[in-house]
Amino acid sequence: MKKKIRVGMIGYKFMGKAHSHAYRDLQMFFPDTLRPVMQVICGRNAEGVEQAADQFGWNEAVTDWRDLVNRDDIDVVDINAPSDAHHAIAISAARAGKHLFCEKPLAITLKGAREMLQAAEEAGVKHMVGFNYRFAPAVRLAKKLVEEGRLGQIYHFRSWFLQDWIVDPEFPLVWRLQKEVAGSGSHGDLGAHLIDLAHYLVGDMTEVVGMNDTFVKERPLPDTMTGLSAKGSKEGPRGAVTVDDATLFLSKFACGALGSFEATRFAPGHRCTNSFEINGSKGSVKFDFERMNELQVYFTDDDEDVQGFRRVLATDPAHAYSEAWWPPGHTIGYEHTFIHEVLELMEAIREDRQPVPNFNDGVKCQQVLEAVDRSIAERRWVNVDEL
């Protein structure tokens, strides 16, 4: 009989739905891996979490995460609650001997992230951090081209993650705009993904220098909020926005490459433009998540009369995960990156190894985030190893 991995999940909104979908559909497409059992889902609002349990397919709903992490019928604790809750839950779950799957950013401080890693290592449990964009087949192709040297020496990594969901100054003050809950704004929410992609594709960064701004200083308090949507009254009380609306920074990589990063929620017309370009001595690649199945590829050794970027559709049999999905040209979507994440977690448990990316990657990302913050505060280049 196939081994089952019993999951307890804390959080049930945007990421809760994405993770639930992954657990539910994993076996349909990857039948040879371990079977996740959606045992318990947890949320603070009893009515809301009960509804989510029924909608998503969880066996049980509870409202206290402390009870969940200590249950004997849980093997993996999945943490996708707001960022300020990650630290306490992860450390308690690790001490209870549970494997960990935690959304990014790992914690709201580097100190907290390091403590989470230490707790997981001391407990000897598996630990994974939710950088789902690594798991798009086109990103895997970019990684392959870099690793195989087909782009040559890497000179540039430029990246931008642009959204527009809070451009309206009357959009309510959701938790993602409060530093004590989120840790940071666009920098830790969007920029964290860019940083992880840079680490994955190009390698470690050595120095950074940045700038940021908060364009709308206060907003109406929310009456309701779910995921990235919220409602509030223009005439009601208002609160201060305590995070960045946009952060930009430059970096130097250990390999000698230069990097540029832009994260903003104030780019009208950009819903989820998560993009990067890599330039090397032998070629370049370009990726935009809004066209996530495509990678633009250029090689300098093409004949001169046909040189130019070519569109590679990363759904053919040559590409990562393609054997599980549809015939060539039949695209996959955002939700499938989470299925690939859960596949990596299940395979790591089965093979008795750490999944990738894990809490080490989360700490490394947090280190760059805080190095940029220090650079902005002190108006200077900051060596990442200072932190």
Image (cartoon, rainbow, N blue to C red):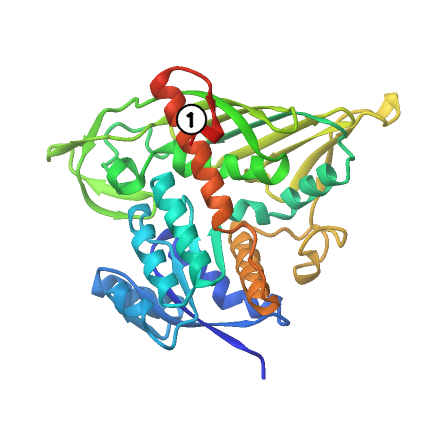
Identify which amino acid the numbered label 1 is placed on: Val
Front residue (pair 364, 278): 364
Viewer-closest of 294 and 249? 249
The residue that label 1 is drawn on is 372
Category of crowding for the residue at label 1, using alpha-carbon neighbours closer than 10 angstroms: few (below 14), some (14–19), many (at least 20)? many
The local secondary structure at tag 1 comes to: helix
The vertical placement of 359 against 39, above or below, is above
**Residue in the foreground of this view, choosing between 271 and 77:** 77
Q: Taking 205 as reference, is 68 above or below it?
A: below
Residue 191 is left or right of residue 168, and the answer is right
Q: Position of residue 126 (x, y in %)?
A: 49, 61
Looking at this rendering, what residue extends furthest in the left direction?
236
Up-down relation of residue 61 to residue 106 (above or below): below
Question: Image quadrant of residue 29?
Answer: bottom right
**How many numbered discs?**
1
Q: Residue furthest top?
A: 379
Residue 277 horizontal/vertical position (percent): 62, 29
Residue 93 locus on image (x, y percent): 36, 63
Task: Name which residue lies at 21% across and 60% down.
Answer: 45
At x 61%, y 35%, the residue is 203
The answer to whether residue 144 shows anywhere in this view is yes
| One can see residue 264 in this view | no
The N terminus appears in which quarter of the rendering?
bottom right
In the drawing, does residue 210 fall left or right of residue 291? left
Residue nearer the viewer, 274 or 42: 42
Q: Position of residue 206 (x, y in %)?
A: 54, 27
Give the quarter of the figure containing the C terminus: top left
Q: To which quarter of the image does residue 327 belong?
A: bottom right
Residue pictured at 59% horizontal, 27% vertical: 253
